[in-house]
Amino acid sequence: MSSYLQYSLNVMSKKGDKRKKKVLLKRQRAQEEIRKDHFVPVCYQNGFTDHNKKLWVWEKNTYEKPFDYKYPAQICWLDHYYQVPEDLLKRFHQTSPKVIESKAFTQYEDSIQRLVDWFSMCIESISMQDFIVLCHGYLLQKQRVPFHVSGLEDLAKTEMGNLARGAIKDVRTNFMLGVKNSPDYEQFKDHPNLKYFLSDEYWQTVFDKSLTLPMDWHHTQLYGLLSTATGSNLAMTNALGRLSMMQLHILRAPEGHYFLCSDNPGFSFIANPDVRGTVSTVNTKFLDNVGINFPLSSKLALYIHQGEQQDLDAPERKVHYCEVPEQDMIAFNFDTIRWSDKKVMCVDKEYMNRYVQGLKNYKP
């Protein structure tokens, strides 16, 4: 309960004002029923706040609405988003519905904040264990956002579509052969119903219906997060192994520039500069020739890429620092906007407005 509500209730009790106390109690119960599960941690967002500990928030693709000016705790959360249902708790032999937060999120959030402080002091190297924590924190962040749920659904539909397309093609071929070889074909070949069953329109309908997936994708996301929390997510382990072989760079924003953040922070790119996307923890082959950009604060960003072969037995990993050229800085921030879900955040209102106006006036 907020301190203001508590104070008001105490005052109401002393004055005996029952009507106002009833209203305040109702508001208190409403607050207690809401559990703010942040999919972008408050401690991470703090790195993008100004002297008032607030940040500017743009609702993506809205150009007339003014920016919001909010505390990190007020944004990027959903009610009871990480509360694990009973069936998953039993499956993983867990008892606490908050197991994902306690076993997966907390330790990495604390460790990454410590590393960001070190990078701001330009330390020359970090331990291999800390580098793995950094990579794990990035992968975990990509796994925990709502954007990941739509990614799971798209991936499944693509795979199901490929399977369905092949299966339906075989069924259609056999159906048409059977119909045309029928002794009654010549008699009924011009019948409207038969024409429809032989048409592309009908088979497209069959294909579309085959893609109706009765799946709870948020439940699937929780399953993945719970696997990570309990150390049984093999896809995460494989992706982490690939990332740990890459080089570590810390990018610094030039004077007058800032890194933007979003409700889906970080993005990946591959050798072809025309193909960009968010890294998938399932498709580990994608990490063979990939680079990862991840804003750490308004002035620092993580850049991990496939460079020279790294010595995995070395106790430390060297940190390479680089000031980002202005044009690359602009491209970085536009990619942050591109891969955001619904919100983009920045420490400086006018700086973010330059990007928003650039998007508004863009004519492909």
Image (spheres, grey):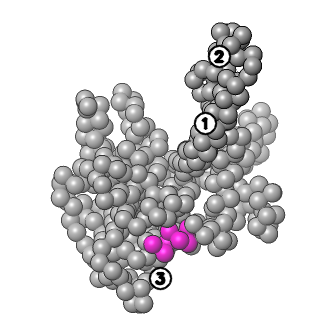
The question of residue 241 being in magenta is answered with yes
Query: How many badges with numbers are in the image?
Result: 3
Residue 349: where, in percent of width, then height?
31, 43
Please report the residue visible at 22 percent of the width from the left and 55 percent of the height from the top.
328
Determine if residue 211 is in view: no
Q: Which mark is residue 196?
A: 2
Residue 277 lies, with reference to residue 174, above or below; the image says below
Q: In front here: 59 or 207?
A: 207
Which amino acid, mark 1? Lys
Name the secondary structure under disc 2.
helix
Whether the magenta-drawn stretch holds residue 136 is answered as no
Q: How would you classify the magenta stretch by its main secondary structure?
A: helix
Quadrant of the rendered structure where residue 252 is?
Answer: bottom left
Taking the image as shown, residue 263 lies to the left or right of residue 303, namely right
Give the alpha-carbon distance from disc 1 to disc 3, as whole Å.
51 Å
Looking at the image, which is closer to me, 299 or 210? 210
Residue 92: x percent and y percent?
76, 67
Question: Label 1: how many residues lie within 10 Å, few (<14), some (14-19) or many (20+)?
Answer: few
Q: Return the residue at label 3.
A: 129
Name which of mark 2 and mark 3 comes first in the sequence.
3
Identify the secondary structure beneath mark 3.
helix
- Residue under pointer 1: 169
User: What residue type is disc 3 on?
Assistant: Gln
Judging from the image, what secondary structure is the residue with disc 1 in? helix
For the residue marked with disc 2, what is the amino acid?
Answer: Tyr
